[in-house]
Image: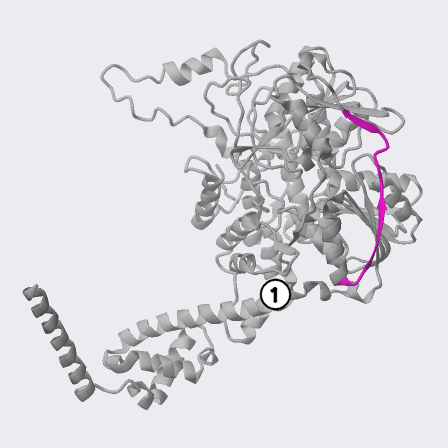
Amino acid sequence: MRNKLKRSSVNKLETEVKTYFRDKFGAKSDLGKVFKEKLNVFFNTLLVEQGLKPELVAQEEYDRFYIQLETNIWKGEAFLRKEFERFIQAIMAFKRKDVSSTILRDYLGQFWLHTEARRLNRKVVYHMGPTNSGKTYHAIEALCQAKTGCYLAPLRLLASELFDTMNSKGVKTNLLTGEEVLEVPDAKHYSSTIEMAKLQQRFECCVIDEIQMLTDSQRGWAWTRALVNIQADVIHICGDHSVLELVKQILALCGDTLEIREYTRMTELNVMDHQIPLSQLEKNDALIVFSRRNALKYKADLEELDFKVSIVYGRLSPEVRREQARKFDEGETDIMVSTDAIAMGMNLPVKRIVFSALSKFIDNQEKPLTFSEIKQISGRAGRFKRFPVGEVTTLNRVEDGLRILKNSLAHHLTQSDKAMVGPDLDIFSSVNNALDANSLPSLSLSEFLRLFNTMTFRKPFYCVDMKEMIELAEMVEAADEDRTLSNAEIFGFACAPVNLGLIEHVQYYLWILNHYVGNSPIVNESIDDRSDNIDYLETSIKCVELFQWLSRHFDQKNFEFDEKSLLENKSKAIERLNELLSDKIGKACSSCGCKMPANARFNICDDCFSRRNFNRRPQQGQDRGGDRGQDRGQERGQDRGQAQHGRGSDRGQDRGSNRGPHKGPGRPQEKKDDRKRDGGRRNDKPRSESGERQGSSSSSQPKKPAPSGMKPSGGIKKPSGAVKKNAAAAFRKHR
């Protein structure tokens, strides 16, 4: 105790002595102010050296800085430079966030007012009802009667169907999607995907389909934007009851009038009193699965039972889906095997919906279907006049399936309270213009998106999930090291429809990006339309669609291709893929592609199993640790658990030095996998545009090397190290 007291006394004495000497002999804290004229000149010179304007720092901020320095102004130029750099970083960070946040708060606080649509007295007609109630039919009839109008679809498939339907009725209509534009002479109507809505054009009538999608965390921003900004005298919106209150709130802010028209199902929908085995499926049944792997597996199983099968899943292009649906509709096939892509945009003559499961994998976790999802899918059963009673059941393997179905169909949809809002190029440009006016460095797109994601919105508006868009923006910024791209170009690349779960798709995107940044020609390479590889054709078609989207978005700058030849080659590839999907699928080894017996228990043949396991066992006395697991899980490079984005885009390129530069659209990768049972589930499936999880299932067709025509032409600019690092990080993140 005595030692502690002594030490305390000594410390106190030392403090008093230091204080005395500082007050007696030390300079006062305002010493810097005495020399502020010379110091101002010195520090302003440092600002200019860093490319900043002297107006960035006000005299009051300099005075506070000098007070902090005190007598340290005598420590020399190197010290002052270091302290001033830290001071400037703090000033810029504070001012950039303050200015940017102010602009965003002002915009988001009343963004619905900043549009020409507020000059109109709009009338909104809500066609509200369940699936198969005829609500969309009545909205389209009103559209056909208008002199000018537009139909905004959730999917390209629906936009294409309405394009055909309206033209067949004598209503000249143009088609507008991100991938293609089909113009009809003298057309005054448009059928487009909702992201491509013509917000600057005046219409007499507009139809917005599936309005409940405005709550979707990935794409909901497009529905909110259309509802708020579309310039139409009458707007017909179609959807279920779940967003009625939300729509009322939004329209109240916009000052629009609302009329509600309720519809009931035109066919009866019943839950069967028993589950069924796979063998008891019948003609006009639809079997619902939740992964591409299971879709192909059940198709093969049903073909073994002598059924003719159509198949639909998210990774297929709209043209392939439409052809598969046509065959089912016209009776060329008996059963439709589909993922939950069937829930939206597919009007099929389905007598009975059969669920193979009532859960799906999202972000590597098995999650039960929501009441809304079960209702939406089940509602596809039954068709007016053809099947007056629709039925729904599950396979025998689904535990407690009938009870869940009955509870879901009896459940009243709860009212959603969140409408999604996303950033656009205009607000991004406004923020950077404000920063420039205040002599502050502009924000990169990834910085802007992160700031936007932190903003508080006025209810009922919320920010969409922007993880994928941020990842894509970081890739673009890493590739554009010399800052040659404009804000519009960076924003455009960040919005590109890239499937981050498909490594070939990301590689092709990066190949196009590097050519565009390097101002090099971007030449489309033909697909081998004679290939027998389903994976290859699926991926190649997706890559061509990405090529079309980017070339159209950037007005074909640097893109060199003959559109007629591209469309013909794509059409042949789609036709070939349809042939393969329509043919009877046989079992093949997921590694070497050799044919296997139909009753084979595993996904790889005995030879591949022996080579990968027994031959790799170390000799006696050797270390058994080694690289035992090096070949395991390589197929995961193509799969990921998502979402959402988004916009995953998202998002990377290659995962190791053994991959060369970009392999071109859809080059199939050799998959390596452990020996797995057919019934095993993959839980790292990425989302499709419909929300279903995809995966790199073992193709039923033998693997073959990519045709030479699919390789990008010479002179490819390899991606920078930053791009590779960013890409690899994206893949690791989504494994």
Q: Secondary structure at mark 1?
A: helix
Report the side of 303 relative to 42 (left or right): right
Picture coordinates of residue 468 (x, y %)?
55, 47
Check the image and report above or below for 290 versus 719: above
Picture coordinates of residue 523 (x, y %)?
62, 43
Q: Nearer the viewer, residue 216 or 645?
A: 216
Q: Residue at x 55, y 56 (%)?
A: 453
Report the side of 619 relative to 410 (left or right): left
Q: Residue at x 31, y 89 (%)?
A: 35
Quarter of the picture containing the N terminus is: bottom left
Specify the color scheme. Answer: one colour
Range of residues picked out in magenta: 254-270
Q: Residue at x 60, y 43 (%)?
A: 498
Q: Residues within 10 Å of mark 1 (few under 14, many from 20)?
A: some
Check the image and report above or below for 109 versus 601: below
The residue lying furthest to the bottom in this view is: 34
Picture coordinates of residue 86 (x, y %)?
36, 70
Picture coordinates of residue 676 (x, y %)?
49, 19
| Residue holding disc 1 | 429
